[in-house]
Image (cartoon, rainbow, N blue to C red):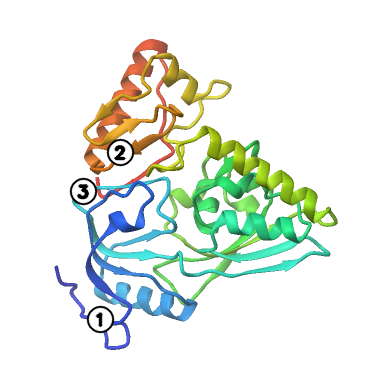
Amino acid sequence: MAAPVSPSSSLRPSLRSGVPLRDFTTWKVGGEAEWFAEPAAGAELLALLRWRLEAGLPLQCLGAGSNLLIADSGLAGLTLCLRRLQGSRFDAQEGWVEAEAGEPIPTLARKAARAGLSGLEWAVGIPGTVGGAAVMNAGAQGGCTADCLHSLQVLDPARPDQPFTLAASELGFAYRHSRLQQDPLVVLSARFRLEPGHDPAAVTARTSANLHSRTSTQPYQQPSCGSVFRNPEPLKAGRLIEDLGLKGLSIGGAQVSPLHANFIVNTGNATAADIAALIAVVQERVEAAHQLRLHPEVKRLGF
């Protein structure tokens, strides 16, 4: 496929066409991107967004590719993977942390622990980036992004030269939700307020304990997206699915994990269609048994 406007010579090293997106998702499924790029700096990102506007192409942004199901047919337009936009800065005295959108949230959690900053211990097992965590209000172990996020620097892809700041109070945070799931804004960086003055060894120990808890009870050795369904509080989605005997249920190469029922894993040859079909079957079984519809945390693209 060809874009209406050809990339300039300066963009050609960055832009690729026909890139398999399975290589950029934690489920290891998904078709090709019409155009794809991984900007490593803000100036490169802006140049790509300007070209996208001139070409009149749709835009999709990825982070670590978790909590994401991309259709086997792939994605039209420009797909940007922001995971190379990394970096963080710490004020250990005051508790301020600034991180680029592509910084892995587990990496940030460990850095904060070593600086004696408490508040991100829960994030060490989250398979995503800072930007993705903000969009999804990612959480685990009783904590979530909304607990410690102060503000975001974002831009509107329609006006890429005018980045602006959104306070956490403007993000409409709820359980695994923010307004960024509807508003087409690109997260550039995040600013967190953590608790300073803690013993780094103690914070690191809590962080490591949280990671051990997750890796010992969840199928981290197989491709997945993390938890598939939101918990219908006070109930737990995994318990509802497990109690119906659905662990191990498979469609094609997609399987409800025998280790944790709120995970669907790729056993090796799953397609996005397999996973989508298995999600639907689990929803139907739970609804038939409990008159309760489970809602996926997973974002679908290209369906």
Residue 290 figure quarter:
top left
Residue 211 shown left or right of residue 40 in the figure? right
Q: CA distance from mark 1 to mark 2?
A: 38 Å
Q: Residues within 10 Å of mark 3 (few under 14, many from 20)?
A: many
Q: Residue most toward the bottom?
A: 9
Residues 229 and 257: in front is: 257
- Give neighbour class at mark 2: few <14, some 14-19, many 20+ (Cα, 10 Å): some
Q: Position of residue 62 (x, y in %)?
A: 40, 58
Q: Quadrant of residue 258?
A: top left
First reached walking from the N terminus: tag 3 or tag 2: 3
Residue at image mark 2: 267
Residue 5 position (above or below residue 300): below
Q: Does residue 59 lie above or below 255 as drawn?
A: below
Q: Secondary structure at mark 1?
A: loop
Distance Cα–Cα, label 3 vs label 2: 17 Å
Q: Amino acid at mark 2?
A: Thr
Q: Which residue is mark 3?
A: 72
**Mark closer to the chain start, 1 or 2:** 1
For badge 1, the amino acid type reads Pro
Residue 84 in view here: yes
Badge 3 amino acid: Asp
Q: Is residue 127 left or right of residue 286?
A: right
Q: Is residue 175 visible?
A: no
Residue found 21% across the figure and 78% down from its top = 5
Q: In the rendered structure, are the residues bearing label 3 and label 2 in contact, judged by CB atoms less than 8 Å apart?
A: no
Residue 59 on image: x %, y %: 32, 63
Q: Position of residue 54 (x, y in %)?
A: 28, 77
**Residue toward you, 43 or 51:** 43
Q: What residue sits 29% from the left and 24% below the top?
A: 281
Looking at the image, is 148 positioned above or below residue 240?
below
